[in-house]
Amino acid sequence: MPKHRAIPAALAAAALLLAAPAAWAAKFTVTSPGMKAGAMMPESTVFKGFGCSGGNTSPALEWSGAPAGTKSFAVTAYDPDAPTGSGWWHWTVVNLPPGTTSLPAGAGSAGGTLPAGAVQGRTDFGAPGYGGPCPPPGKPHHYVFTVWALKTPSLPVDANASGALVGFMLHANSLAHTSVTFLYGREK
């Protein structure tokens, strides 16, 4: 075979080897119906208090492509831009059954319905459940919603568990995670 044909064939073989793992596994993804990644969150999801007057309704989330062996799921919402030095936990919910692939809007809000056995931890607002965005006036903040596929059927936490504790346990038991980020800001 001439040399000029051997190089492209070798490159093609290398490209196939590099792409093969991606084809073998489904991609783990999360979306929120009606909300586009990177877009502003609607007022219905904004916290009610701290100078904000939103509806404090957790957004609907849908996910797919979890890895084989997933024994439970968890969902977190976190603001890395909060002026605290450690960010701000807006929502932690763990012990979602392995067949769960979505949460409806309001599932984490007061009076919302979560699957049996699910536990919501304490937000940085001081109470369990969903606490929507309410950044200080100025530049919009990023709100990262993450779905965690876990290798354990449950985490030993209760409604008093802080976001940091839940985060520690999630990292220790994670098979995979996927995130979607939204924005929210206010002028005054």
Image (cartoon, grey):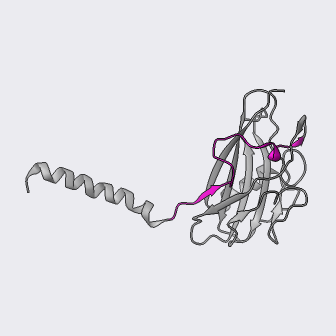
Residue 137, position in %: x, y?
81, 28
Vertical position of residue 14 compared to residue 89: above or below: below
Q: Which residue is most to the left?
A: 2
Q: Which residue is most to the front?
A: 34
Q: Magenta region's main secondary structure?
A: loop
Q: Which one is nearer the viewer's eye here, 125 or 162?
A: 125
- Seen at 78% across and 59% down, the residue is 93
Q: Quadrant of residue 47?
A: top right
Q: Which one is nearer the viewer's eye here, 34 or 66?
A: 34
Range covered by the magenta-colored residues: 26-48
- Seen at 66% across and 65% down, the residue is 150
In-image side of 83 versus 19 (left or right): right
Q: Quadrant of residue 9?
A: bottom left
Residue 174 visible to an observer of this rendering: no
On the rendered image, what quadrant is the C terminus found in? top right
Magenta span contains residue 41: yes
Residue 177, position in %: x, y?
62, 57
In-image side of 6 versus 163 (left or right): left
On the rendered image, what quadrant is the N terminus found in? bottom left
